[in-house]
Image: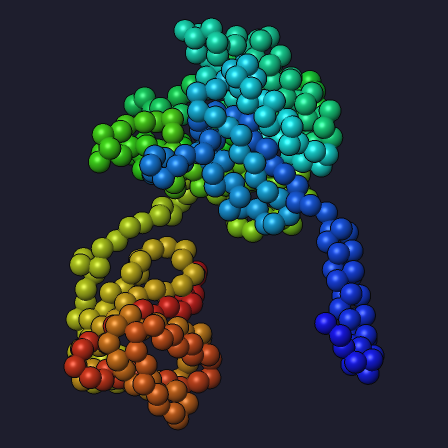
Amino acid sequence: MFLPQPVVGMLRPALSLALLACAFSTLAQAASPPPRQVFIAGDSTASEYGPERAPREGWGQQLQTFLDDGYVVRNHARSGRSSRSFVDEGWFDGMAKDMRAGDVLLIQFGHNDAKIEDPTRYNEPAKAFPEWLGRYLALARKKGATPILVTPVARRKFDRGQLLDTHGVYAQAVRDLAAREHVALIDLTALSMDWLRAQGDEASKPYFMHVPAQQQTDDTHFQTRGAVMVACLVVAGWKQVDPALGAHVKRDTDCGAPATALADRKAQPHPSLVVHERDLAVQQPGPHGGAGTTTAYPFFRDAPAMGFEFRKRVLHKGAGIGLHQHHKDEIYYVLSGRGVYELDGTAQVVQAGDAMLTRPGSTHGIRQDGDDDLVLLIMYARKVP
């Protein structure tokens, strides 16, 4: 197509700017490093499962949810594999071809290495098991990647309330290898056992494949909530050996429990409590000169050494909390119903989902409005002796 010379002259600056912007964009893309790949070599506790296997998931499926775009998870874990069969069946080579300098290799085996009845998978723990794991360390070093050894995640196996260590010498073999080779270690066996002890026998079942609808009672593999928890434990352990990872973690990793959790619980002078509001209801007139009848639920009123009051109050039709001045912070939260909130000479309608904060020096009151009870949650500081 022919363009007149004046038109071409007008287009040249715009074309130059567009080409310059394109060049800068290309340079910026070239300057920004690609995300670090996180390879997982492991067994069924870490591997991926399709929707047809739901709710079963491996912890590797959930690892990416904890990491930002600076890391991309390549989950090569495969069900039923040991450190030996993962290599013999070609999964090791398939992983190796994509690994590059700067990547991370998480290595978790042990569940199937202990299967003495299967010579294609079995590795005795003293020599063969660490020798096979050594191949993964050598691969990572050859590629310029960072290897991290991970002890096998615990099975949920309780006996008379005591959690059994089913990985014993295999977990110890991983710890010993990490120490000999000066390789970072995530002691997932210890972390997951501490979590399970604190969780308890019955309460931990829904994290594993205890699925009555599928007639499954499986204490090795996880439902989604269990996969998320174990992924959280992995990332928490990873941050311990590589604090720089914290800048790329986008979810909190305050998960699990310390090894001292059960002892701490027994030593607590003021135990934790569960109460039921049906046991607490107290009929009262409207407080602070308020009209009508209310029902108060003074949760944890007698709990010692607690720094706040927490209660529910129901203002029945026509009831209210009379105007009074505050010497402390107090929060009202409307659970249901409608009311008129009076604050420092003003009044406004409040309803479910509204929260009101009254600071010291202000005056406030509230009255029920409409046909339904006004239900409030109330919290304020308590003087602790």
Please report the residue visible at 35 percent of the width from the left and 24 percent of the height from the top. Answer: 157
Q: Nearer the viewer, residue 155 or 286?
A: 155
Residue 323: x %, y % from top left: 33, 86
Percent x, y of residue 16: 81, 70
| Quadrant in the picture for the C terminus | bottom left
Residue 288 is at least partly visible in this image: no
Report x, y in % for residue 261.
45, 37
User: Looking at the figure, which quarter contains the N terminus?
Assistant: bottom right
Q: Is residue 113 above or below residue 69?
A: above
At horizontal 52% and vertical 10% (from top left) the residue drawn is 123
Task: Give 251 or 1, whichever is nearer the viewer.
Answer: 1
Could you tell whether 380 is left or right of 275 in the image? right
Which residue occupies 57% across, 46% down?
Answer: 67
Q: Residue at x 27, y 34 (%)?
A: 211
Q: Nearer the viewer, residue 153 or 94?
A: 94
Q: Quadrant of residue 311?
A: bottom left
- Please determine whether, in this image, residue 321 is positioned above or below residue 38: below
**Front-lying residue, 189 or 224:** 224
In the figure, residue 99 lies in which quadrant? top right
